Every structure is written in structure tokens, then in C-alpha cells.
Image (spheres, helix red, strand yellow):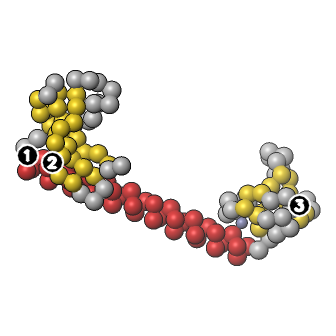
Amino acid sequence: MTARTNKRPGYCAICGYTVPTGQGHIWQDQDSDEWMVAHNDATICTRNREESASVEQAREERKSAMTAESEKLTADVASSTGLKRQDDWSWDDFAYSLGAVLAESEHFRAQEYLQSGTRIGFVVKEKK
Ligand SMILES: [Zn+2]
């Protein structure tokens, strides 16, 4: 198996980032027969993998912060109103609608949830 220089850009088999023409080597995968490409400079792959790991970590942190924020708003509204959080079906079922805003956090809004005009709980939705 002789490695050859890539004549077209492709996605690196090691790090997943684009390998520009001439900056990688290609080989044919033994199992799939597909042509693979990888960066010649392994430090590029290492740096790219570290970068994508930190992007992924930041995404995870944001997601758990959002979940915590939504749960806190839910708990606050539940304890101040005595209402329970409901799933919002108002987009699909005309019997249900949203009423007054009860509370807001940075990214979420808690609104009264009405069934045929009667308050039966509240919903927490991400602000648009
Ligand atoms: Zn790479």
C-alpha cells in the first residue's frame, strides 16, 4: 500500500476536517475499497480534534445550562402559582391555548395553559 498525495480536497479520516489538495495522502481502505484521505501533518489532526472536542464540550455545557434554567423556571412557577407544568398542545389542538405570561428567565417564558379558556397549568417554552 503506497500512500499518494491527494489531488482533490476531502475529509480527513483522522480528524474529519477538510484536507486541502496536496496536503494529505490517500489510500484505499482494505475493507470498503473506498479512497481515504488524511492530513500529512499529524499535528493538524491533533489540533483539529482538540478544537472539535472543545466545541462539543461548549455545546454540552450550553445544553445542560438551558435544561437547568428551564427546570428552575418550572420549579419557581410551580411553587409560586401551585400550578403544574403541562405539555403544550395548543399548536395542534384548538381546545388549548396560551394565556398570560407568568414568569420569564433569560431564555424561557412560562405562560398560563388554558383548556377552553380555563387555566389548567402552565407551559415553559424557549423564547424565539
Ligand atoms: Zn486530519
Relative depth, front residue between 65 and 109: 109
The x, y position of residue 12, in whole percent, is: 73, 60
Look at the numbered disc 2 and give the secondary structure of its residue.
strand
Give the number of the mark in front: 1 or 3: 1
Mark 3, residue position: 7
Question: Residue at (51%, 68%) from the top-left corner?
Answer: 54
Q: Amino acid at mark 1?
A: Thr
The x, y position of residue 98, in whole percent, is: 21, 36
Crowding at dot 3, Cα within 10 Å, few <14 / some 14-19 / many 20+, comes out as few
The x, y position of residue 3, in whole percent, is: 89, 63
Task: Classify residue 124 by image quadrant.
Answer: top left
Horizontal side, residue 57 vs residue 108: left or right: right
Question: Residue at (45%, 65%) from the top-left corner?
Answer: 58
Question: Residue at (73%, 73%) from the top-left corner?
Answer: 42
Look at the numbered disc 3 and give the secondary structure of its residue.
loop
Real-space Cα distance between discs 1 and 3? 66 Å
Mark 2, residue position: 102
Q: Amino acid at mark 2?
A: Leu
Real-space Cα distance between discs 1 and 2? 9 Å
Q: Amino acid at mark 3?
A: Lys
Sequence-first tag of 2 and 3: 3
Give the number of the mark in front: 2 or 3: 2
Horizontal side, residue 23 vs residue 77: left or right: right
Q: Are marks 1 and 2 in contact (CB under 8 Å)?
A: yes
Mark 1, residue position: 81
Look at the numbered disc 1 and give the secondary structure of its residue.
helix
Residue 107, visible in the rendered structure: yes
Sequence-first tag of 1 and 3: 3
Q: Is mark 3 within 8 Å of ligand 1?
A: no
Horizontal side, residue 54 vs residue 61: left or right: right
Q: Are marks 1 and 3 in contact (CB under 8 Å)?
A: no
